[in-house]
Image (spheres, coloured by chain):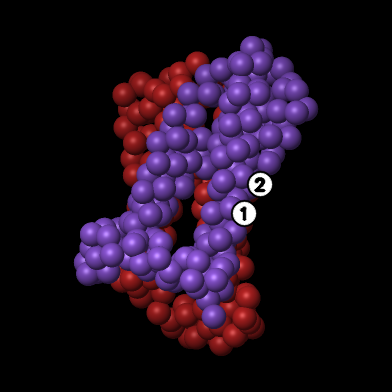
Chain colours: A red, B purple
Amino acid sequence: MGFLIWLEEGALGIFIRESLWGYPIVLSSHAVGMAIVMGVVVALNLRVLGYAKDISILAYDKLFFIGWIGFIINLVSGLILFCNTPTTYFFQGSFQLKIGSIVVGGILMKVVMNSVRGDTSETLTKVASAACIACWFSAMITGRLMAYL
Amino acid sequence: MDYDTYAPLASWFEATWLGGQMREQFWMFPMMETIHFIGLTFLFGSLLVIDMRVIGFGRFINMKAAMKYIPVAIIAFAVNLSTGIAFLCADPFRYFPNIAFQWKMGLIVIAGINALWFWFGEHKELCQLADGEDAPFRAKVIAALSIAIWVAVIIFGRMIPYVEY
């Protein structure tokens, strides 16, 4: 709790609360980063689930790199947004679910990429892929609902 | 925009059944927002595959197969047009005069023209590309424009609540 208060009262917290354009600009970056991460996750997993089969999954590697750029944009903008009211967000159920979904969704993305390259059965790969999409959507939905719940 | 110009249209949107539901059911607005975000994801993801392939990033994505993401993008756009109309019906007098909303709508029209140009001008030729083959420069410009315009659409959309006076 001490750390959360320190964050909230620190320079980033003050900036995001008091600067006129700080919040909307960082929030917009968060939306663009989200579009990139979610876009790559969805496009890639659609392919793993069997859509557009003529594309080699390995050809998505470069796109995956773009996904990482989006993830970094959102990690940075997310941390800044968090400093707005960390003492509230940290204990908010929707925020906790969001972070949990990102962690599990990230691990599942790694699992999917490994099984695509390895000799994991197709069924198992598809189950992991569907779960991966579900986790990332859960992250997005709980993130949106943080404004309401 | 002048109040007298948009007021009749705004009143019409406001009086629709959908508008009433959006205002009366507390869960309608967040639900539509969530669906709008899901649509955004499918739309932008599809564009990333096609446009990045054309630009030359991920050149080994089979170009013809990548076009299969076009119907995904169109369905996603239809979803976001519908949910977008729902927001508009909820509070048209808020959206019509909003500068970020106006820019967003204008950019979507430009993105649409750009997409038509892609479909009628470049699509056929692009489908002939071998894996790893570079797309013509003209097509790369369209693809880069597409990404840039949609990023701007997302930014202006997100700005709508913050430019009210």
Residue placed at 69% from the left, 39% from the top? Answer: B144
Based on the displayed image, in which of its 4 quarters is residue B100 positioned? bottom right
In this rendering, the answer to whether A120 lies above or below A83 is: above
Q: Which mark is residue B142?
A: none
- Residue A137 appears in the rendering: no
Residue identifier under label 2: B148
Tell me the subunit letter for badge 2.
B
State which quarter of the image contains the N terminus of chain B: bottom right
In this rendering, the answer to whether A56 lies above or below A12 is: above
Q: From the viewer's side, name the closer residue of B144 and B115.
A: B115
- Residue B140 appears in the rendering: yes
Residue placed at 34% from the left, 36% from the top? Answer: A130
SS under mark 2: helix
Q: From the viewer's side, name the closer residue of A6 and B121.
A: B121
Left-right relation of A104 to B66 = left
Is circle 2 on the same chain as circle 1?
yes
Q: From the viewer's side, name the closer residue of B92 and B5.
A: B5
* Mark 2 burial class by Cα count in 10 Å: few <14, some 14-19, many 20+: few
Q: Amino acid at mark 2?
A: Ala
- Residue B97 is situated, as x and y percent measured from the top left of the image, at 52, 69
- Residue B14 is situated, as x and y percent measured from the top left of the image, at 32, 65
In this rendering, the answer to whether B59 lies above or below B2 is: above
Based on the displayed image, in which of its 4 quarters is residue A65 positioned? top right
Q: Are marks 2 and 1 in contact (CB under 8 Å)?
A: yes
Residue identifier under label 1: B152
Q: Amino acid at mark 1?
A: Ala
Tell me the subunit letter for badge 1.
B
SS under mark 1: helix
- Residue A1 is situated, as x and y percent measured from the top left of the image, at 44, 83
- Residue B12 is situated, as x and y percent measured from the top left of the image, at 34, 62
